[in-house]
Image (cartoon, rainbow, N blue to C red):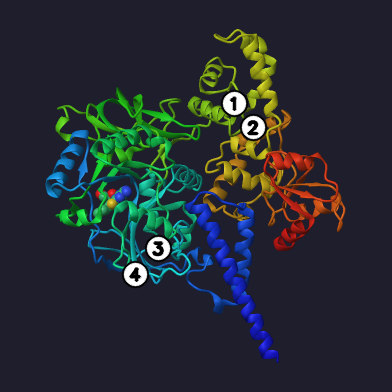
Amino acid sequence: MKRASSQRAGKEIQSEIERLRKEIRDHDYRYYILADPTISDFEYDQLMKKLTGLESQHPDLITPDSPTQRVGGEPTKEFRQIRHPAPMLSLANTYSEEDLRDFDKRVRNLIGAEDYDYVSELKFDGVALRLVYEDGLLALAATRGDGETGDDITANVRTIRSVPLRLSFGRGEPRYRSIEIRGEVLMNREGFQKMNREREENGEKTFANPRNATAGTLKLQDPKEVARRPLRFFSYYLISDELNIDSQWESLQMLRKLGLPVSEHARRCKDISQVVETARYWEAERDKLPFEIDGNVVKLNRISQQQRLGAVAKSPRWAIAYKFAARQANTILNDITVQVGRIGTVTPVAELEPVYLAGSTISRATLHNEDYIREKDIRIGDTVIVEKSGDVIPAVVGFVPAKRPTGAKSFKFPQKCPSCGEPISRFEGEAAYYCENYECPSQVRGRIEHFASRRAMDIEGMGESAVDQLVSAGLLRSVAEIYGLEKRREELESLERWGKKSVDNLLKAVDKSRGRPFSKLLYGLGVRHVGERTAQLLAEHFGSMQRLMDSSEDELQFVSDIGPTIAESVHRFFQDKRSRELISRLRAAGLQFEEAARSREGKLSGKTFVITGTLSSFGRDEAKELVENLGGKATDSVSKKTDYLVVGENPGSKYDKARKLKITILNEEEFLKLIEMSK
Ligand code: IVH
């Protein structure tokens, strides 16, 4: 009797687990493939949590295709080598309309009288990937390697959300025994930049561009770390004996049907003129995409025709890459100067003969650091190659040896700060030189600019040129003096280009900044390695300037996500007499030294609730307290920032407003369920 009932319970749990998995998979598909989610991140997390909970109680029921199995397995030592049964070919490159038309002529000659058409696709600037699905389950993911053999990176690829762990099939459809899919792994520009910002904050090396970041990530031996990186995938090629597919266009539809991400920007072109037109379009519009592309790939559509054309050497004859004009240009390196940043970093800057490059004229570019210049052997007078990719600042990437003039001069890094004349030094293990003079005018300017910037204290009217002017005029010698400007109205008004109105506006903006949250002030102080996110973490953890200043290095490291480098830097900053003096002046100026309404950490962190109407199980204030105890925020009025409106009996106008703003509305029962799940 007992056994039978526990068996039944077991069955029920199993079916609940399967139901949850299916629901999560459907949401994954909507989110990662269709980009059209129907539930909030929060609700999604709740489902995941529930599934993880059930699976951890019943580990025997865990299957490798469960959505919980993406978090990343154990670190590996080296990748297994995989031989590709069909080599992973590369494509011949073309660079002009003429090249494309030549390609078309070759195709026509080979095909003869038959009709043919093309598919034009984006050429994703990422890393090629080969996937094998066996009986519908992801069995292998491999890099291209040399085309013949690549690395088995299955554990890493399993963490990429847009790569399905199992293919989707319609009811009654066969489960294909073996399907091979090829495509490209990449990162959106935004995710890449965010990741780089965080790496910079943590004192880690940044990546040059999204492609390098993707390649570097896929090579990691720790899938858990890979899971944290913003990788995504696009498929563009399908091979299987079991599928009856006649064309590339059909392949793309089929891939979509199997649940794989396929770009919506593939286009069927009836002739080469349409191919050319598409290429022109994307060359002009590439920046509108959230990720980098470096061209178009043109493919003969019909598979039978592809087979007839075959391949030469390592490239197929039926496809070609049209590469966009590189965002590189050659120009003369007139000089190398050095620039001093707000934390004293001394960086070499290339002074260039102005050159037009991807939409703007540039005359300066970064040379990174002393070692970089030496390794690349770049000399003054050289014709250098400058590159601009995405939103990244232009950089010198090399020089043209054939054009090196006799007398090209090697650069000697200065021993003194160009701004204040003090000696500069290089710390062990770091590539950069630092000027350690806190009073160095360049640093003073940089600190003030940073403090006033939008993401910090947001003082409108205090941008680069205003700061420059105020510092040069002797009106500002430190960040603290910003709050003394009110007493110097006359001097301000007498400055060139300033009048009563602009001074008024500036002083108003200064006054307004007194109300900026403590976390923004903390970010604005410009402590080394403390970016926006770290500032927020510190502000939340310590709650006040005093507690933060009094904390030891150990206590700092206690904050999650704060490692020894940041802890050391923060501690050093607050031990410094000059910092302490600055802080006491800022305190006297009436800035926010406490983090407002320290929200408790909890399952509802970051979520804002509004409660309206009468609830039956508890009073409104009780409900608010519940929300706050779980780390959420409860406010009284509905706005775009509201995440949930909880509705009791007789709701007021808040209900209508929430509906208009498309805010998730919960009735009492749903609210209770959410609270229950969050505990
Ligand atoms: S098709 C035989 N389609 O470009 C066909 N490749 O030089 C092989 N790539 O290694 C590739 N976007 O990494 C194809 N839509 C696309 C592509 C694409 C990017 C990459 C791929 C390949 C390289 C070819």
Cβ at disc 2 under 8 Å from ligand 1 = no
Q: Mark 2 highlights which residue?
A: 582
Instruction: Using a 10 Å C-alpha cutoff, classify the residue at mark 1 as few (fewer than 14 neighbours), some (14 to 19) or many (20 or more).
Output: some
Of residues 87 and 253, the one nearer the viewer is 253
Residues at marks 1 and 2, CA–CA distance in whole angstroms? 8 Å
The residue lying toward the viewer, choosing from 246 and 133, is: 246
The residue beneath circle 1 is 478
Q: Is residue 134 above or below residue 556?
A: below
Considering the numbered disc 2 on the image, is that residue within a helix, a strand or a loop?
Answer: helix
Mark 2 neighbour density, 10 Å: few (under 14) some (14–19) many (20 or more): some
Q: Nearer the viewer, mark 3 or mark 4?
A: 4
Quadrant of res 23: bottom right
- The amino acid sitting under disc 3 is Gln
Element under label 3?
loop
Along the polypeptide, which appears first: circle 3 or circle 4?
4
Q: Are marks 1 and 2 in contact (CB under 8 Å)?
A: yes
Disc nearest the viewer among 3 and 2: 3
